[in-house]
Amino acid sequence: MVRAPCCEKMGLKKGPWAPEEDQILISYIQQHGHGNWRALPKQAGLLRCGKSCRLRWINYLRPDIKRGNFTAEEEESIIKLHEILGNRWSAIAAKLQGRTDNEIKNVWHTHLKKRLPKTDQSNSSTKRAIKPKIKRSDSNTSIITQSEVASLNFREMDTTSACTTSSDFSSVTVGESKNNSIKSEDIESLETMPVIDESFWSEAAMDDENPTTVSSESMTFSNEMPLQYPFNSEEIFQQGQGYNANFDDGMDFWYDIFTRTGDSAELPEF
DNA sequence: AAGCTCGGCAACCGCGGGGCG
DNA sequence: ACGCCCCGCGGTTGCCGAGCT
């Protein structure tokens, strides 16, 4: 089935927004919110498609938008986050208060990309970022927050429940299955598993005799800062029914590690 | 001063995922 | 289980102003 173009209908305006249109959109959203973008332009009396309205609001009119040049800190954050996330601009934007994905994308392409060595530039375009695969928690599970993950401070992880299910940080479910069966979705997840180092697998995870225990010691960073791998199912089991750690929480964790180590060379690739 | 080039940025396009009937 | 609808995302386009010749 071929999807009809967004603004196929005649009479819908395209291109730059006029100040009057902005005003209409702002006042409408202030009064009514934006429940349904598709219906919004008609209700607000705008000759725009809903998509265009949404984009204009998100990228320009939102009251919490921070305008102006990016600070050095922000640029540094973008570079670091891009190392972690790849071209997932919305995820990067979520970490930068008041900045939009579009803005970050533009800054990246116009300024920041040029700063990288050529090899990195070519890699970055094809670099595979973690796909967000947010799993909505069941009624009998709960979301674990970044701080909760960080506070767990584990020595070991159990790959039966932690590794296989946390292989993609967007989708971590612990406490429901204790078997080692690999599902098709796990295969995709395994592809996006952080590449750590060879010893990580040879010493622990790939140990035939003890395939489920991984020592966090095998994950080392260049500055010798001791790091604790985030997930330990045993303690998590003790805490309750299980949990879902969603994608952003996982990213928060890795970003935290990154900012602590400050060494992109040692960052796990996705 | 006029024409051209380039960079920056706002906006558009098309795809994929999730919700819902 | 399936199809439709809507939303959000990432890639791309095109306009516009600044700088250069």
Image: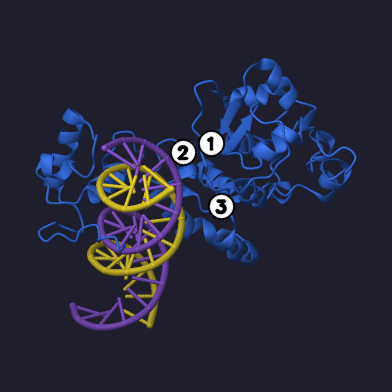
Chain colours: A blue, B purple, C yellow
- Image location (x, y in percent) of residue C13: 32, 69
Question: Could you tell me the amino acid type at mark 2?
Answer: Ala
- Residue denoted by label 1: A248
Q: Residue at x 51, y 38 (%)?
A: A134
Q: Would you say the residues marked 2 and 3 are in contact, meaning their CB atoms lie under 8 Å apart?
A: no
Q: Secondary structure at mark 3?
A: loop
Residue A94's label in the rendered image is 2
Q: Residue at x 54, y 48 (%)?
A: A131
Q: Secondary structure at mark 1?
A: helix
In the image, residue A103 lies at what x, y percent? 39, 49
Between the C-alphas of marks 2 and 3, the distance is: 14 Å
User: Could you tell whether A86 is left or right of A102 in the image?
Assistant: right
Q: Earlier in the sequence, mark 1 or mark 2?
A: 2
Tags 1 and 2 touching, CB below 8 Å: yes
Residue at 64% of width from left, 45% of height from top?
A183
Q: Which residue is mark 3?
A: A86
Q: From the top left corner, tell me how far across and down residue A33 is, in percent.
A: 22, 31
| Chain letter for the residue marked with disc 2 in the picture | A
Q: SS at mark 2?
A: helix
**Which quadrant of the view contains residue B6?**
bottom left
